[in-house]
Amino acid sequence: MRRTVTDDELLAVLAAAADAAAAALVGTADWGLVGTRPGQHHSDLAADRAAVAVLVGAGVGVLSEESGRHHADRAVTVVIDPLDGSTNAARGLPWYATSLCAVDDDGPRVGLVVDLVHGTRYEATRGGGARRDGRTLVAVGPEALTDAIIGINGLPASHLGWDQFRALGAAALDLCAVAEGRLHGFVDCTDDGLAPWDYLGALLVCREAGAAVVDLHDRPLVDLDHHARRTVVAGATESLLGELRRARMSTAPLVAPS
């Protein structure tokens, strides 16, 4: 893809890839486990094949959960989870999505998360704001954790001080819910952390909506290594993020996992 491509053109490529993934899922009869590696489903692979073909054909590089790195030498790399929440999808739980983020030398440039159940589209461009189906998103939430409803990934070692929590099973959609105020924050409570494809598309949506997103251990969130993992914490407000981060840090190892 030429370096002069516009944000709108790049967003159109991401949308075409998401549409291809959705169409592939419609034609997939078996959404169960493949048996290749833990957690990989036939639906993951079908969506990946369709989406990656569109992205590579458009001239961008790809980092995919399912198929790894493609064309690493290209100026723009699209980080994709073709089916975020595939366990939910396989079990008929209506919370799963395709998540994409176009990354250049300056970081996340264009993000798109498509709710595959309801058709809702969350999109953001660097410096250009965030939108849900064309409507501008502005993150809102309480200042205090005790008043907040927090999305979690994994099980915390203890209660972290929130009012309520939800474990919904698709990090990209969970983070988009923070961007639009349906959740007030999000925290990863696992030992292993989240991969770039789990959060990068929604990271840009959150940041452009005014929400704050960090790694618990201050590591860069953009890392195009397939093995990279981060402990993601997000808050609709800076004060809420700080309080949630301190609470999560109280249960974390002193040294970040490698």
Image (cartoon, helix red, strand yellow):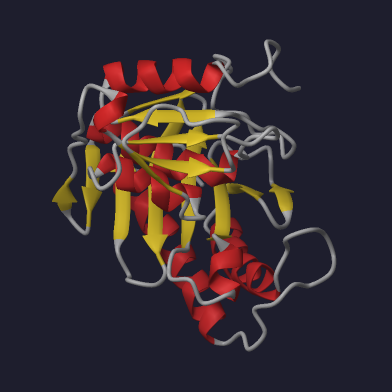
User: Where 107 sits versus 177, above or below?
Assistant: above
Residue 174 image point, x, y percent: 41, 48
Q: Tally the numbered discs.
A: 0
> Residue most toward the top?
254
Give the quadrant of the C terminus.
Answer: top right
Q: Residue at x 73, y 60 (%)?
A: 39
Using residue 17 as the reference point, say whether residue 136 is left or right of it.
left
> Residue most toward the left?
135
Residue 98 image point, x, y percent: 48, 60
- Determine the image quadrant of residue 207: top left
> Residue most toward the right?
36
User: Where 166 sits versus 207, above or below?
Assistant: below
Using residue 15 as the reference point, say whether residue 187 is left or right of it.
right
- Determine the image quadrant of residue 45: bottom right
Q: Residue at x 61, y 38 (%)?
A: 194
Using residue 14 as the reference point, say whether residue 39 is left or right of it.
right
Residue 109 or 191: which is nearer the viewer? 191
Residue 91 in view (yes/no):
yes
Q: Residue at x 50, y 32 (%)?
A: 104
Residue 130 image point, x, y percent: 25, 42
Residue 228 or 91: which is nearer the viewer? 91
User: Where 256 sits versus 150, above or below?
Assistant: above
Residue 185 or 45: which is nearer the viewer? 185
Q: Residue at x 22, y 37 (%)?
A: 129
